[in-house]
Structure formats: C-alpha cells, structure tokens
Image: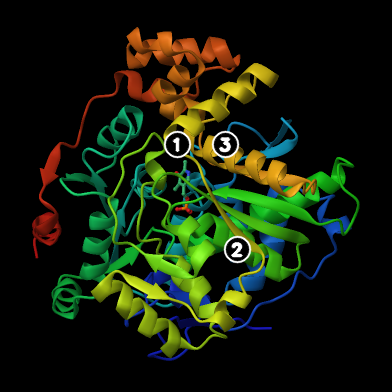
Amino acid sequence: MDILYKSTRGEGGEVTASQAILQGLAADGGLFVPAAFPKLEVTMEQLSKMNYQEIAYEVMRLFFTDFTEEELKRCINCAYDSKFDTEEIAPMVKAGGAYYLELFHGATIAFKDMALSILPHLMTTSAKKNQSEEDIVILTATSGDTGKAALAGFADVPGTKIIVFYPKNGVSMIQEKQMVTQRGDNTCVIGITGNFDDAQTGVKNMFGNTELKERLLSKGYRFSSANSINIGRLIPQVAYYVYAYANLLKEGEIADGETINVVVPTGNFGNILAAYYAKKLGTPIGRLICASNENKVLYDFFRTGTYDRNREFMLTNSPSMDILISSNLERLIYHIADNQASVNAAMMHDLKTKGVYTITDAMRAQLGDFLGGTASQVQTGEAIAALYEQTGYVLDTHTAVASYVYNRYRQESGDETKTVIASTASPFKFARSVMEAIDKNNAVYSDMELIDRLSATANVAVPQAIEDVRTAPVRHNTVCETEDMQKQVEKILAL
Ligand SMILES: *Cc1c(COP(=O)(O)O)cnc(C)c1O
C-alpha cells in the first residue's frame, strides 16, 4: 500500500513521504498526516526477535513507501550506530513498578536524538529523490533539546544549513552550553528574548511567508523543519514504542497480545502522538497518559474538551515541556474530526485569533484512550527523590513529571496494567534540579560539581555529551528580540 500525505488544513493535494519530509510544513500552514494508516505486517513474536534497526525498518517502511529498501536501510544504519552509547539503542529499566524506556542514549542525551539522528539522512535522500537543487535551510525553534539534537544531526551535512532559535532565559545551563558550543560551518544558534511559543510562532510565520520564500528560491535555498511538525521526525519515534512492546515480550514481562499503558512527559505533543500512531499500527497499547508540568494546557484539554492557551507561561524545572501551543495536537484534532480538514482548520483559526477552541462531543468521544495528568515542580522533585530512595534509580525532571503522574493514576484508578514510561532525557542535562531534589544541601555546589556528584549518586558515568561541553569554546552568542527573527535569517543567508 502506498501511503500519501495531506495537510491537516486541507488545501492542496496529496504528496509523497519524501515530499512531505522536504517541505516540513504544508503550504497552507497545516501539518502533513498520512492519508491512511497502515498495519504492522509482521507479528510481535517476529518483532521480539529483531534488533532496534530491524524494528525501525519494519515501522518506517510502512509510512515512507516511496523510499526503496536500500535507501531506508541506509538511513537507519547511518542513524542508529555508535553515536548511541548502547547497542540496544533504547534500553528499558524496570523500577518502582514501571518500565522506563530510556530514549536518551544518543549524541545529545535527550530523546530528540531518536528522530534527529535519522532526519538529516531522510532529508538529503528526499532531496535527491525529488531532484531538488536548492540547499535546504533548517529553521528550528527549540525548548532546549531539539536544538542541540538537530545541530548535531545536520552539522556539516552537505547541501544544508541549520538555524536554531531558543528562549535565552528558558533553558538549562547544560542545554544552552551544548547549543552555543556547536561546531560546523553550516550551523547558527540564536537566543531570543521571548519564550518557546514565541520562537515556534516566529518560525511558522517564516514558513508561511510567500514573499520570503520567493527571495529564498532566487538565492538557491528552501526552508524545511526539524521540529516534530515534520513527519520525518514523527514517524521514527513510532518505532521505539513498537520496540518497547517487542522487548517486553522478549523478556517475558508480558504475554503476546497483552495490553500495556504508556505514559509520556509532554510538551509539543510529538512523542505521545507517536505512541498513538504505534497503537494505530496494531501495537496493543491501552491508555495513552499525557503528563504535563505546570503549563498544563493539555491536562485541562483532556479534562474539559477546551484548549485554552490564554494563561501565564510558566518557567519550570522541566523546561523542554514549557509550551502552551502544542503543535502536534493539531494532527490528533484532525484524526478525531474524522479527517475533516475544514473542522480542524476552523479550530486552529480560533486558536490563532482567540487562543482557545472547544472540540465537539463526537470528537471528545474519540479521545477515550487519552488521559491527562499534571505534576507541579515540587511534586516533580518529590518523584525524583522517592524513586531514588526506593531503588537508587535517578530520573531527569521531565521523566519525573511522568513518573509522578503514573503513580497517582495507578493509586486512584487501581489499574495494574504494565506500563511503559518514556524516559526523555538523561538526568545529567538537568543536574541541578535533580540533585537539589535528592538533597537540598546540594544547592551550594557549582553546576560542574553537581555533574560529578550526580555521577556518584546515580552510579552512572558522566556521559560524553557532558564531558564535551565542559571545556568547549562558545561559538554562538547572538541574542535578538522575537520580532527580529526574520531579520536574523535574512542576514545569515544574505537575502
Ligand atoms: C522535547 C521534550 C519533551 C516533550 O516532547 P514533545 O514531543 O514535545 O511532547 C519532553 N522531555 C524532554 C526531555 C524533551 O526534550
């Protein structure tokens, strides 16, 4: 079956996977979605005997149907290699009655590596397939982790440039250091005075600016996106949920066909949407539990059916989830509106103009598998301390939001279904918040001292990604006002 892609806002026809990857965002401002959902063509029993790369192939070939077997396997093998510090790629740790799927063993120690280590290969292959002559300019907004993972993926890739915007005062010290020390002649990193939503809106506006697009083309460039609005980022994430299930089966933790629940610490709604896609492929997933921090716009949405971004933006100790406009929710809205683009487009128009929309009862009825939960910063710290005291296992702050939400759900519902928690970052990326949660006396130490103390506490070696930034020189120091993002891009590209 050939899978084609169309915009969630309905204008324009269907495009192939490679065209959708190249474009990033549809011309009408919508997101590309598969026009039909495939089903896994191998059994879980067969998948349980495969390694990560083989499972990734079985998943991605269903969606990227215009790639040849040779092309897709080459992309997969270039992505999931020794950049990861374990051959398992995504190991699973059982602790405190749940299974933590560790998605942070790639080059930049956050789950963004799972997709961004393959996206540059998918994109350059897509450019070749479509005889695209232009250089690709990746415009990226980051809440902290996407930026570094995208920079690492695209650095020095021929035919590409990458420009990353991050909220100057909204990321952790390590996140910022990782980005501003990035090497590669084709990389640019810019702090903005606004928050992540401002950065994402600024980038989306540039994508939608036809005049700018014309000027770009005349200089031999075209924009694309490394954010999870790009289908080429979303689909590789589906693979690890299938892998998680197959792995539980292999280890004898579940019986074939047994339903599992999934809990995902959520910001832009990409990761949990990938779990939903894995379920649609036929993976026996029951509940999809969406865990939010104090920016709990999604928690309120799942409770009430109203999405309302008119509220104060909070800076929390899980900064990669400090988001009020969760872009990928648009894909879910489209699917639960029975793929009616006009219904989705009207709601997205309300979101843009009024900051709020309400879904219909019929749409709500289709959200049965989803459940929202939220954890305050204090509860997040308590979750880290509690699991550490109980098991010695140390979580990062984002995963701890999910851990808190899971434990609360389990207590309140009595649901003992085996549960996979997406573990989205290494605790080393957020060492200060993590160490102060475990012992408030850690507040007196410097950030770098806390790295070593965390290593001793968790009994885990300091990851290479952290060693790399300890001494690396700063290479990027531009900061701009939110309004000036486009000016910066024009300057960099000499438009
Ligand atoms: C990006 C990120 C998230 C949120 O993921 P979404 O796909 O945007 O919902 C959660 N935790 C960490 C560590 C992240 O980097």
User: Would residue 448 be seen by someone viewing this image from the given angle?
Assistant: yes
Q: What residue type is labelled 2?
A: Leu
Answer yes or no: is residue 133 visible.
no
Q: Does the residue labelled 3 lie within 8 Å of ligand 1?
A: no
The correct choice, above or below, for 165 with respect to 379 in the image is: below
Neighbor class of circle 2 (other Cα within 10 Å; few <14, some 14-19, many 20+) is many
Under circle 2, the secondary element is helix
The quadrant of the rendering that contains the C terminus is bottom left
Q: Name the residue under label 2.
A: 72
Q: Position of residue 198 (x, y in %)?
A: 23, 56
What's the CA distance linking mark 3 and mark 2? 19 Å
Which is more N-terminal, label 2 or label 3? 2
The kind of residue tagged 1 is: Thr
Earlier along the polypeptide chain: callout 3 or callout 1?
A: 3
Left or right for 253, reference 389: right
Alpha carbons under labels 1 and 2: distance apart: 23 Å
| Disc 3 element | loop
Tell me the kind of residue under disc 3: Phe
Q: Is residue 302 above or below residue 456?
A: below
Q: Nearer the viewer, mark 1 or mark 2?
A: 1
Q: Where is residue 219 in the image (x, y as percent from the top left)?
A: 15, 70
Residue 84's label in the rendered image is 3
Instruction: Residue 174: give its label.
Output: none
Which residue does the numbered mark 1 point to in the structure image? Answer: 108
Q: Nearer the viewer, residue 340 or 381?
A: 381
Q: Do the residues labelled 3 and 2 touch (CB within 8 Å)?
A: no
